[in-house]
Image: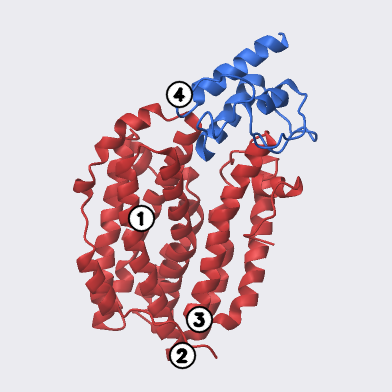
Chain colours: A red, B blue
Amino acid sequence: MTAMVTLPSPRDLYDRWESQQWSVARVEVGRDASRWETLRPVTRRELLVALAELEIGEVCVTQTLSSLVDHSPTEEDRIYLCTQLADEGRHVQFFKQYLLGPVGVDPAELEQPDSELSLLSAYGQIFEPVLRDATRRVRESGGDPAVWHAGVVQYHLVTEGVIAAPSLKRLREFVRAVGGLAALEEGLSNVARDETRHLTYGQTAARRGVQNGFAEVIGQTYLGALEQAVEVLVNPGRKAVTPVIRAALAHHAGQLDEQWSVARNRMLRQLALIGLDALRDEAERAWERAFTRAFAVYEQRWDAPHPVPKAAGLGLLTPRAHV
Amino acid sequence: MGTTDITARIHGIISRMSPTGAAVGSPADRLVEDLGYDSVTFLELAVALEEEFDLTALDDDQATDLTTVAQVEALVIGTAEPSAPPA
């Protein structure tokens, strides 16, 4: 048996939080406004959808974290989770100010659940109900430890570790490639640093849970959430850019596959980190099934294949995220 | 519309969308090295060409690598040739 990587304690993560403070005001989002006016429609649309997705996700996690705080297993956990709650509120403010400022989104687009942006959000449509249900059950159970650990899995390991972190990584790379969006680069860098603390906490708490008799609920909750996590990544409800120029299709599909590959690696690495590497094969199978299903839903919805299987079918891509 | 007109329109689009503002000088110009294209602007160019020339279906013989302006011309005009080696 190999030695497990040492994970920081909640107290260590609290100390990091104190030393990694930042402020939305100091990012000065308005400096990106002139660049947004020059963005071409394809790039503008890609950025807008990605930012709206993050904003909707951040609002959800801000509204749902309190039940995990209230029923923390130790005071050290509670104090750490309070810092995370503050972070999530700050992220909401950053994305909201950015979307309403330089991007120029109508406030109603962010606030109304049936707005076009809200309906385009895969997280809002697919995973938000799962997270709200998981955290509601924590509250209704009065903090039953098994239910609390299931909530941590849905919140930290799946939402933040499998869905948000790879999406944030791809968005940061995309923003760098677009260029001229200094405020967005700075803000996303700050958000990513916070998110690293958050998902590290999830791994710490889940590993402790595995060691303290909650391996079954943690493992089954994790495996059970993968199908919806993959559906969020593929987002069958949104028509993907599908170039008919082969070189562009190959390139675009390759970028999506790269993002999903990062998600897959994180999904498997988390299992090992929390002490459930024995579930690796089962997780890989669930991951593959989820992609097959999501691609089928996409094709049925749009009467055309998703660009990734389309590129793979034409021999333009050898997928790494699903095999 | 003649091939010359189409070529001129292609050159106009490639020049207009070049991130560095560089104009197409010759068909041998390379999109990345000479005209400053990157992953983002390449996708934008592809979508713009599809819309401008109503490219709606993948051609089985279409080149899978677009390195030069000449290859873009060949693709749009419908006489795509095998990928040229990098200049």
Tell which subunit mark 4 falls on.
B
Q: Residues within 10 Å of mark 2 (few under 14, many from 20)?
A: few
Question: For the view shown, which residue lies furthest in the right direction?
Answer: B61
Q: Secondary structure at mark 3?
A: helix
Quote the CA–CA distance across marks 2 and 1: 31 Å
Q: Which residue is mark 1?
A: A58
Q: Nearer the viewer, residue B15 or A308?
A: B15
Mark 4–mark 1 CB contact (< 8 Å) = no
> Is A168 left or right of A190, judged from the image as shown?
right
Quote the CA–CA distance across marks 3 and 4: 57 Å
Q: Secondary structure at mark 2?
A: helix
Quote the CA–CA distance across marks 4 and 1: 38 Å
Quote the CA–CA distance across marks 1 and 3: 26 Å
Residue A64 visible (yes or no): yes
Q: Are marks 2 and 1 on the same chain?
A: yes
Q: Which residue is mark 4?
A: B21
Q: Nearer the viewer, residue A167 or A38?
A: A38
Q: In the image, what residue occupies the spot 60% across and 53% down?
A: A257
Disc 4 vs disc 1: which is toward the camera? 4
The numbered dot on residue A213 is 2
Quadrant position of the N terminus of chain A in the picture: bottom right
Q: Amino acid at mark 4?
A: Gly
Mark 2–mark 4 CB contact (< 8 Å) = no
Q: Which residue is mark 3?
A: A217
Quadrant position of the C terminus of chain A in the picture: bottom right
